[in-house]
Image: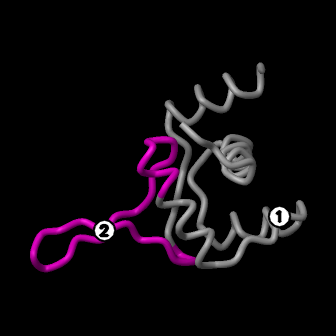
Amino acid sequence: MVIKYTWLKILDLLKKRGSRTTVADLRRDLDSRGFHIDEKELAEDLAKIRDLGLIECDLLVTADGNATVAVDDYSTIGITAAGLRKLSAIVKI
């Protein structure tokens, strides 16, 4: 499994918050720490992290019953138990 350093920073910020947060708040926290991530890249990264099961985020259900990941400024995201374990395992290294 390949994990980008920015993904670790995202997981770390979510762990420090301790609860779900909006994507806009996460972006502000990242910017304040010097991690200026393009909106499109952040959305792609959050989708990949979610696919790995490290974060949970809002899902939009379309009329045909398909669920898609909702990643906009008002979407909420949070770290999962698997994300906490992955973060602590990598930090120990």
Mark closer to the chain start, 2 or 1 = 1
Left or right for 92, reference 73: right
Is 40 inside the magenta-drawn segment?
no
Cα separation, mark 2 vs mark 1, equals: 26 Å
The residue singled out by tag 2 in the image is: 68
Q: Nearer the viewer, residue 79 or 41?
A: 41
Is 55 inside the magenta-drawn segment?
yes
Q: Residue furthest front?
A: 2
Q: Amino acid under label 1?
A: Phe
Residue under the image location 49 percent in, 55 percent down: 48
Q: Residue furthest left?
A: 64
Left or right for 42, reference 74: right
What number is the disc on residue 2? none
Q: Secondary structure at mark 2?
A: strand
The residue singled out by tag 1 in the image is: 35
Residue under the image location 45 percent in, 43 percent down: 52
In the image, is residue 62 above or below residue 11? Answer: below
Q: Position of residue 8 (x, y in %)?
A: 70, 44
User: Which residues are drawn in magenta?
Assistant: 48-74
Q: Quadrant of residue 25?
A: bottom right
Q: Residues within 10 Å of mark 2 (few under 14, many from 20)?
A: few
In the image, is residue 35 above or below residue 62? Answer: above
Do callouts 2 and 1 mark residues in contact (Cβ within 8 Å)? no
Q: Position of residue 17 (x, y in %)?
A: 70, 48
Is the image coloured rainbow, by chain, by secondary structure, or in one colour? one colour
Q: Residues within 10 Å of mark 1 (few under 14, many from 20)?
A: some
Residue under the image location 65 percent in, 42 percent down: 18
Q: Secondary structure at mark 1?
A: loop
